[in-house]
């Protein structure tokens, strides 16, 4: 187990740069999740850490050792792939033993390590089966077992649950989180699914176009995002954004989409009248009794039982406004909904740069 540090890590393919100087510290024993839309560079960054892609520039250390250009086998990492990458002609035991056998580990030691991993992963009954006689979840457990027996300093997971159905994904999510607690190992996990990131991570790293947009604990990214991208990416249903203009000597923001309501803003930055801003408000932050009021035309109600979501689309909206509804009285689609919100729950962003105004 060890910490990982990247300093100005850069990846180029020929003349094209795809990772633009990433600085990152993952503490010993942390569960760190790389998340972001397709093509943002998550897999490339993970493969650079694994040594499967050469790092073009910058420096990488694991447990204080410089591994920037080290052979993958000498980095102290083990990777679990989305496609499992099991040998089809080998049994579960053989698949899990293979890396150790090649590395020259003694037979009794291999048996001990493989049995211990099989017990952790509840694979004991399947050790003589071949991969084709296993479910997707069991295959993924074998792939994880193969990583565990190597006792790496850092585990690397590349979208390991993407090939599983929704129910199994939730189950495996919990199992991997438990495994992390049990092993106390440093883990880096790549996913495009922000729910996986929120539920599993100690630290989330949000990537876009080969750069880190923000890194931190899930709750901080949710409650205190640095920019519009992170605010919109983390959270489901997503945050609502309203275009607004600064008015009244920099003290309020007027929101045309909410009937011109003027929201008092308290930020330390100086605002000038006429400045274009974007105001963020999460669906759960609408409260009927809150001081600021507006009215929304509702076109769809999504009833999930304990909670409902009201959707309001108007011309010019990039996304519908989503309001979370609790309690007994639920409006009908096609009607008007009175909504309220507290100025303390809104976040302010600069429309042009997308950066948070604090
Ligand atoms: P993600 O895992 O976030 O979906 P990737 O790390 O696979 O993204 O890709 C990041 C960027 O690098 C993409 O723009 C992709 O097209 C580019 N890329 C990946 N592999 C190569 C390659 N072998 N040659 C050139 N560009 C590549």
Image: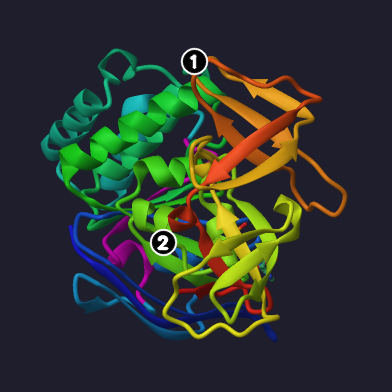
Q: Quadrant of the C terminus?
A: bottom left
Image height of 21 relative to 332, above or below: below
Q: By what rule are the colours in the image chosen?
A: rainbow
Q: Is 113 one of the magenta-colored residues? A: no
- Report the residue at 41% width, 55% height from top: 223
- The image shows residue 149 at horizontal and vertical percentages of 24, 41
Q: Which residue is mark 2?
A: 224
Confirm whether residue 94 shows in the render.
no
User: Ligand 1 closer than 8 Å to the CB at disc 2?
Assistant: no
How far, Cα to Cα, is label 2 from label 1?
47 Å
Image height of 26 relative to 20, above or below: above
Mark 1 falls on what kind of element?
Answer: helix
Region in magenta: 70-86
- The image shows residue 50 at horizontal and vertical percentages of 41, 63
Q: Quadrant of residue 121?
A: top left
Who is closer to the viewer here, 351 or 210? 351
Confirm whether residue 313 shows in the render.
yes
Q: Which residue is mark 1?
A: 133
Give the class, few, some or many, for how many residues have Cα within 10 Å of label 2's Cα (few <14, many ≥20): some
Quadrant containing ligand 1 reads bottom right
Mark 2 falls on what kind of element?
Answer: loop
Who is closer to the viewer here, 166 or 80? 166
- Report the residue at 25% width, 33% height from top: 178
Query: Relative to 339, is 95 on the left or the right?
Result: left
**How many numbered tags mark residues here?**
2
- Report the residue at 51% width, 75% height from top: 357
């Amino acid at each position: 187990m060890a910490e990982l540090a990247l300093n100005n890590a850069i990846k180029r393919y020929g003349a094209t740069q795809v990772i633009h100087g990433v600085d990152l510290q993952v503490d010993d024993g942390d569960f760190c999740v790389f998340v972001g839309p397709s093509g943002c560079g998550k897999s490339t960054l993970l493969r650079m850490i694994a040594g499967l892609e050469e790092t073009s520039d910058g420096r990488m250390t694991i447990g204080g050792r410089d591994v920037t250009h080290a052979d993958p086998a000498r980095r102290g990492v083990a990777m679990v792939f989305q496609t499992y990458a099991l040998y089809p002609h080998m049994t579960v035991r053989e698949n899990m033993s293979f890396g150790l056998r090649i590395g020259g580990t003694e037979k009794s030691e291999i048996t001990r390590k493989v049995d211990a991993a099989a017990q952790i992963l509840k694979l004991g009954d399947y050790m003589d089966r071949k991969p084709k006689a296993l479910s997707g979840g069991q295959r993924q457990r074998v792939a994880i077992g193969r990583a565990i027996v190597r006792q790496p300093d850092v585990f690397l997971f590349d979208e390991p649950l993407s090939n599983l159905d929704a129910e199994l994904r939730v189950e495996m999510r919990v199992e991997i989180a438990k495994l992390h607690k049990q092993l106390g190992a440093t883990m880096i996990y790549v996913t495009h699914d922000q729910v996986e990131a929120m539920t599993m991570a100690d630290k989330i790293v949000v990537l876009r176009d080969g750069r880190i947009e923000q890194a931190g604990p899930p709750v901080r990214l949710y409650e205190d995002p640095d920019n519009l991208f992170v605010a919109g990416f983390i959270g489901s249903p997503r945050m609502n954004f309203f275009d607004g203009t600064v008015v009244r000597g920099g003290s309020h923001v007027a929101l045309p989409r909410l009937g011109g309501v003027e929201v008092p803003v308290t930020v330390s930055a100086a605002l000038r009248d006429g400045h274009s801003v974007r105001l963020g408000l999460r669906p759960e932050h609408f409260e009927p009794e809150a001081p600021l009021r507006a009215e929304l035309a509702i076109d769809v109600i999504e009833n999930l039982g304990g909670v409902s979501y009201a959707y309001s689309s108007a011309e010019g909206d990039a996304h519908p406004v989503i309001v979370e509804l609790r309690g007994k009285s639920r409006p009908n689609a096609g009607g008007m909904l009175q909504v309220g919100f507290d100025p303390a729950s809104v976040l302010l962003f600069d429309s042009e740069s997308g950066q948070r105004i604090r």
